[in-house]
Structures are given as C-alpha cells and as structure tokens.
Amino acid sequence: DAGVTQSPTHLIKTRGQQVTLRCSPKSGHDTVSWYQQALGQGPQFIFQYYEEEERQRGNFPDRFSGHQFPNYSSELNVNALLLGDSALYLCASSLVTDRNTIYFGEGSWLTVV
Amino acid sequence: SQQGEEDPQALSIQEGENATMNCSYKTSINNLQWYRQNSGRGLVHLILIRSNEREKHSGRLRVTLDTSKKSSSLLITASRAADTASYFCATVLNSGYSTLTFGKGTMLLVSP
C-alpha cells in the first residue's frame, strides 16, 4: 500500500517563475492538505482540498493555488515566485470521516534563486 | 501563526537518558498530536492525545495533556541515537477539519 507520494523531490526555480508540485494521497484517502515548512520552522497550513473543492485555507496569498482531481490527487501551484517561497512543501492526506489519521509525504524541496 | 510553541528549542542528551519536550498552545483543541521529522524529510506521526485524555503511552513514548494550562509534554524514555530528529506538536481544533497547527519544534540530539 503506497503512502503519500510527492513529486518532484527537489527543484530550483528563478524569482518570478511559476511552479507546480504534485501529490498522490494514500490509497483510500479523499482529503489532501498542503503545508509549507521554512527552514528551522514548523509546517504552516496552506489549504485543504476535498471533493475537488478548497475546504479551508491558511494565511497565504492568492499566488498559492491548488487543485484536486477526481482520483483525489492534488497539485499546488505557486505563481510569481519570491525568494521567501523557498521551503519544504508537504502534502498530507486523510479521510474526511477520520480527521485524526493523517499521513505525510516526504515533501518537495523548492529553492527560489 | 503558530499555535503551539515547543520548549526547549534544542535538547542534547546521551543514549539511555530520558528526553522531555514541552508544548504550549493557545486555543481550545479537539486533540494534540506529536510528530517526528528526520532532517529534511517528511513528518511521521507518533502519538495522538484527545482533549478528554490526560496521559497516553506508546512504547517508549509518554504524552501528557493539561487542557487547563493548554500544554502537553512528550517523554521519550531510554533514548537511542536513532531518536535524533526534530519533534513537533500539532493541534487539531474543534472546527471539524483535519487541519494541523504546528509549533516550531524541538531538535533532539542523542549522542552514543
């Protein structure tokens, strides 16, 4: 049973560019959340998707957008990249009926230069 | 903003010793969870304690929760070098969502 998988593992982008990160949730999970973790900090919630809709959003600008597909996989898009967007982006999956069981992927390291 | 704040920020101990990490939070919660993160990798769930529980054990882990003080502690007994990692507490609010609000974490170094 595959856990949460994320791609790419590492990437480097230039300021002003756009990036798309991908996440496949754990088999059977229907809810996907995205977190940003800056170096030396705890993860911060970006948004959560369920039934292809954004259910909840953290304190992130509109440059951060997402999508969930019918197969429950998800994408995180960040436009107009800033140096401060450099971070580990973590995807977490869960079941809407069991919000306490949350699995994380290994993350995507984004470096903005 | 961060809901939880861990204390200490860093902890260095010898193998075999116990490690205690504390976490404080600000608002009422549904449950509190502890996660472990090896350097630059994903988060691994360790233990969950519900708001109506006061203590929970799992192997070498012991978690306490004091909702009146809005604080929790994680005790790792008989630590091993493999326990070296960052540890985060995260709270789930009563909103009905599975959103986690993390603290800044405690870096634990266990020396052989």
Image (cartoon, coloured by chain):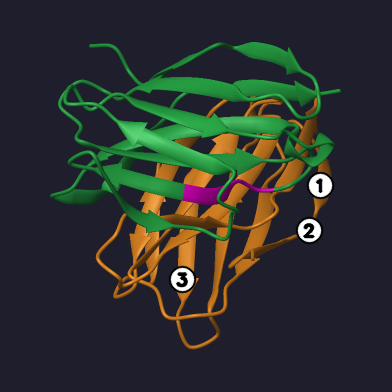
Q: Do the residues labelled 2 and 1 touch (CB within 8 Å)?
A: yes
Same chain, labels 1 and 3: yes
Residue at 70% from the left image edge and 54% from the top image edge: B104
Residues at discs 2 and 1 both on one chain: yes
B30 and A53: which is toward the camera: A53
Give the drawing colour for chain A.
green
Q: Name the residue under label 2.
A: B8
Q: Mark 3 lies on which chain?
A: B
Give residue B26's position: percent from left, percent from top: 56, 79
Secondary structure of the residue carrying tag 3 is strand
In the displayed structure, would residue A14 be above or below residue B11? Answer: above
Amino acid found under the numbered disc labelled 1: Leu
Chain of residue at mark 2: B
Please tell me in which quadrant of the rendered image residue A85 appears.
Answer: top right
Task: Specify the principal SS of the magenta part.
Answer: strand
Q: From the image, which quarter does the C terminus of chain B lie in?
A: top right
Q: Give the range drawn in magenta.
A: A42-46
Left or right: A56 in relation to A50: right
Q: Residue under circle 3? A: B65
User: Mark 1 or mark 3, which has the lower sequence index?
Assistant: 1
Rendering colour (chain B): orange
The residue that disc 1 covers is B11
Residue toward you, A81 or A97: A81
Q: Which amino acid does label 2 sit on?
A: Pro
Please determine whether, in this image, residue B89 is positioned above or below residue B35: below
Q: How crowded is mark 3: few (under 14 residues within 10 Å), some or many (20 or more)?
A: many
Label 1: few (<14), some (14–19) or many (≥20) C-alpha neighbours in 10 Å: some
